[in-house]
Amino acid sequence: MDSTLTKDALIEMIRDKVGYPVKEAKEILEIILEEIKSRLEEGKEVKISGFGKWTVKEKRSRPGRNPHTGDRIEISARRVVTFHPSDKLRDSVNRSVETQGG
């Protein structure tokens, strides 16, 4: 069994749990993902209550090294997306680890 959750798997879950046809389930998922993406592109936070929060952080350019050659390089300024799980999600994940004995 593949442990990766894919868009196709999410579409199937929507179809199975809500009873929407595949085409409508796909449209709903695409709308949600596109809205999240566009908000992040604008530099806005995306917060889903009980799940977590995505934020965009600005990183300044900085010196670095090429790991293969050891040469000095300049790492360009960029924006990165970070995710912080909600306390509810964190607690839920930790509970599932405890029940699995790990």
Image (spheres, grey):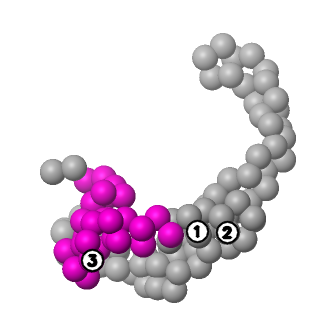
* Secondary structure under the numbered disc 1 in the rendered image: helix
Neighbour tally class for label 3: few under 14, some 14-19, many 20 plus, Cα within 10 Å = some
Residue 20 is marked as 3
Q: Which residues are magenta?
A: 3-31
The x and y percentages for residue 69 are 66, 13
Q: Mark 1 is on which residue type?
A: Ile
* Front residue (pair 9, 89): 9
Distance from disc 2 to disc 3, alpha carbons, whole Å, reads 26 Å
Q: Is residue 51 visible?
A: yes
Query: Marks 1 and 2: in contact by CB < 8 Å?
Result: yes
Residue 3 is marked as none
Neighbour tally class for label 1: few under 14, some 14-19, many 20 plus, Cα within 10 Å = some
Q: Mark 2 is on which residue type?
A: Arg
Of labels 2 and 3, earlier in sequence is 3
Of labels 1 and 3, earlier in sequence is 3
Q: Is residue 17 visible?
A: no
Give the residue pinned by disc 1: 36
The x and y percentages for residue 7 are 36, 58
The quadrant of the picture occupied by the C terminus is bottom left
Residue drawn at x 30%, y 57% is 8
Give the residue pinned by disc 2: 39
The x and y percentages for residue 22 are 27, 66
